Image: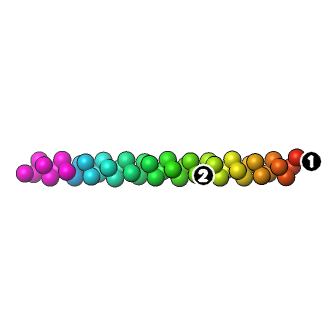
Amino acid sequence: MQKQRARGTTTVATRLREGAMEDMAEQLLHFGIGRLEAIGRQAEKQSP
């Protein structure tokens, strides 16, 4: 009984950890895209 509960909590913890990793990856992706767009706008302003 306790082994099952322990296994259940580990799978939940693993799922939460995976979800957090996905969220972080998504945030980094959006941040990277935002930086690229900002750099692109600056380049447009600087070009004659």
Q: Nearer the viewer, mark 2 or mark 1?
A: 1
Q: Residue at x 88, y 46 (%)?
A: 47
Q: Which residue is mark 2?
A: 31
**Residue at 72% across, 52% down:** 38
Question: Colour mode?
Answer: rainbow
Q: Amino acid at mark 1?
A: Pro
Residue 2 forms part of the magenta stretch = yes
Q: Position of residue 36 (x, y in %)?
A: 69, 47
36 left or right, relative to 47: left
Residue 12's x, y, as percent? Answer: 27, 52
Dot 2 falls on a residue whose secondary structure is helix
Label 1 crowd bin: few (<14), some (14–19), many (20+), radius 10 Å: few
From the top left corner, tell me how far across and down residue 44 is, in percent. Answer: 83, 49
Report the magenta residues as a range: 1-8
- Residue flagged by tag 2: what amino acid is it? Phe
At 79% from the left edge and 51% from the top edge, which residue is drawn? Answer: 42
Q: CA distance from mark 2 to mark 1?
A: 28 Å
Q: Which numbered disc, 2 or 1, marks the residue that appears first in the sequence?
A: 2
Element carrying mark 1: loop
Q: Disc 2, disc 1: CB below 8 Å?
A: no
Q: Label 1: which residue?
A: 48
Q: Residue at x 85, y 52 (%)?
A: 45
Q: Position of residue 4 (x, y in %)?
A: 13, 49
